[in-house]
Image (cartoon, rainbow, N blue to C red):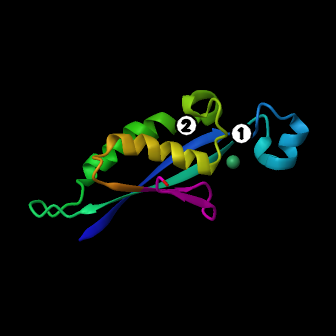
């Protein structure tokens, strides 16, 4: 019997979408306002979803405190109030789109979780735009 436990979190971060190997016109054509050289911010909403068997002894799939602490150290402390392009090493050569941010978050959280769990990351960049990634 597999159950999924979800934990929500939040961070604010700035980014600019562009490729260093393209000129401004090409970046402007592809990324539009997101290519603003002065950066812009988003209120990101994260949902980390952990799927596993219920432990018959505790009744938990995972103690939510463990998940909360992993999200704090791996996501909130690393990304909150940061400029993703400049201050977060994972994006030094990776465009910080919602898609890529979700993959980076997945990899960081997965590395700290017991391997017996399946993980899915849902990342809202705006209330209407969101992406999901579950490792495939
Ligand atoms: Ni943006």
Would residue 21 appear left or right of 136 to someone viewing this image?
right
Question: How far from the left and from the top, in percent, is residue 52?
Answer: 27, 61
Question: How far from the left and from the top, in percent, is residue 99?
Answer: 60, 51
For the N terminus, the image quarter is bottom left
**Residue projecting furthest to the bottom:** 1
Residue drawn at 41 percent across, 38 percent down: 74
**Quick one: label 2, few (<14), some, or many (20+) residues within 10 Å?**
some
Look at the numbered disc 1 and say if its residue's Cβ is closer than 8 Å to ligand 1. Answer: yes
Count of numbered circles on the image: 2
Task: Return the residue nearer the eye: 71 or 2.
Answer: 2
**Residue projecting furthest to the left:** 57
Residue bearing mark 1: 16
Q: Which of the numbered marks, if any, corresponds to residue 92?
A: none
Residue 58 forms part of the magenta stretch: no
Residue drawn at 48 percent across, 50 percent down: 10
Residue bearing mark 2: 81
Residue drawn at 33 percent across, 40 percent down: 112
Residue drawn at 51 percent across, 37 percent down: 79
Question: How far from the left and from the top, in percent, is residue 103?
Answer: 53, 47
C-alpha gap between disc 1 and disc 2: 14 Å
Task: Return the residue nearer the eye: 122 or 110.
Answer: 110
Tell me the magenta residue range: 120-135
Q: Disc 1 on helix, strand or loop? A: loop
Residue 126 forms part of the magenta stretch: yes
The answer to whether 103 is drawn above or below residue 18 in the figure is below
**Quick one: label 1, few (<14), some, or many (20+) residues within 10 Å?**
many
The answer to whether 35 is drawn above or below residue 52 in the figure is above
């Amino acid at each position: 019997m597999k159950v999924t436990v979800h934990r929500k979190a939040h961070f604010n971060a700035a980014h600019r979408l562009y490729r260093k190997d393209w000129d401004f016109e090409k970046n402007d054509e592809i990324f539009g306002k997101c290519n603003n050289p002065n950066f812009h911010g988003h209120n990101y909403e994260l949902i980390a979803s952990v799927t596993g068997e219920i432990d018959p002894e505790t009744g938990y799939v995972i103690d939510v405190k463990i998940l909360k602490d992993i999200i704090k150290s791996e996501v909130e402390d690393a990304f909150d109030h940061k400029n993703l392009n400049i201050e977060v090493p994972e994006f030094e050569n990776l465009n910080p789109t919602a898609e890529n941010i979700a993959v980076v978050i997945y990899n960081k959280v997965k590395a700290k979780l017991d391997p017996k769990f399946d993980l899915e990351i849902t990342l809202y960049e705006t209330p209407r735009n969101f992406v999901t990634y579950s490792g495939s």
